[in-house]
Amino acid sequence: MQNPLADLNLSLPDWAETLLVVACALAAAWFAHAFFYRLLTRFLGSRSAFLDRLLRNMRGPLKLIVLIAALSAASTIAPLTETERSVIRHILLAGLITTVVWLVRMALNLWAGLHLKRFKIDVEDNMLARKHVTQSRILLRAADTVLVVIGLAAVLMTFDPVRQYGVSLLASAGAAGIVVGLALQPMLKNLFAGVQLALTQPIRIDDAVIVEGEWGNIEEITATYVVVRIWDRRRLIVPLNYFMEQPFQNWTREEARLIGAVLIYLDYSTPVAAVRKKVEEIVDRSRNWDRDVVAVQVTDFRETVMEVRILASAGNAGRAFDLRCEIREHLVSWLAEEFPHSLPRTRNELRGGDTTGDREEDGHRLHA
């Protein structure tokens, strides 16, 4: 192709002409982007808050795409050899693919942010909010992984040697394919487990769970693992596929309210009706009780004591735990003051006629 600069009779070396063409192309692209961006912002951004935020967040990727297009045009005009022109266009193509992936990822993050803006997770009834937050975060991480894989594959496919190797690797079932499949198995397993977890939602953000014998809340769900915040501020890191393959307890699967149980062992002479009345007074004064369930029942008889079970409901797992502690503290103080004989004790019964003989026998045993 004939160089348009040749008609100007410029006595410049090729490298200088190339720099001049590149500088002109970049300047034209810069001003064109600024003009059209301001035009779009004025006419589209003023009509919709979503479009305005979309344009503001995508300003960087759009500018980069315009610059890549300008450099591609400059490589055609500049006095370059075919090899140099091919290398430059190859680099620009890889940059264009990377920028498009960046643009799509940014659009997905923006959509997720606007979608989750309607839901508040720091409120009392946050079941619906936790559902949407969990789904959005997991699907975004899965989409990020897929976009990175697709973008990397697209860049590599622009190189003929790598493209041929990739096609032959996918078409064959040789040892290399087996090794790669085994190496990627944990990543792919967690990826599919994340998608399945987002759809079925056995856990959500801030769910109260018992995992590996530890009670805590779901703090973070990543593409490969889940962070459980233990009640004593430790963090338990669990692989993502654990929640699809192993049993665990979820205390807030359908609702956050729980019924707490307190077991106490009392003497048979304890008046259960008085205990029931006292428990009702305790929970009625507590701020942790949700005014739903309270019950006192004798659930078992032992050799020396009876088992009394106290049930009381609360709004969430943390309040249920505090309510159980309140019941224990107030009830044991009341029993020790009002019915001290009700606490478990061991009885020794001495018959009147055998008292002297028993004492003498005990004295002989001590002397021996």
Image: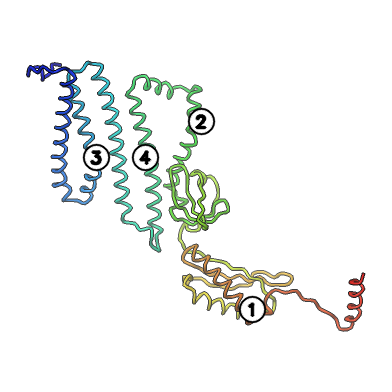
Give above or below for 276 relative to 227: below
Residue at numbered disc 4: 144
The answer to which of marks 1 and 4 sits earlier in the sequence is 4
Gap between marks 2 and 1, in whole Å? 65 Å
SS at mark 1 in the image: helix
Gap between marks 4 and 2, in whole Å? 22 Å
Instruction: Name the front one of labels 4 and 3.
Output: 3
Tell me which amino acid carries mark 2: Leu
Residue 60 — which label?
3
The answer to which of marks 3 and 1 sits earlier in the sequence is 3
Residue at numbered disc 2: 182
Contact flag, marks 1 and 4 (Cβ < 8 Å) = no
Q: Is residue 100 left or right of residue 22?
A: right
Q: Is residue 94 left or right of residue 336?
A: left
Contact flag, marks 2 and 1 (Cβ < 8 Å) = no
Give residue 269's quadrant in the image.
Answer: bottom right
Give above or below for 300 relative to 196: below
SS at mark 4 in the image: helix
Residue 49 — which label?
none
Of the 4 image quadrants, the one containing the N terminus is top left
Q: Is residue 177 left or right of residue 51?
A: right
Tell me which amino acid carries mark 3: Gly
Give above or below for 191 relative to 203: above
* Callout 2 crowding tier (Cα within 10 Å): few <14, some 14–19, many ≥20: few
Contact flag, marks 3 and 1 (Cβ < 8 Å) = no
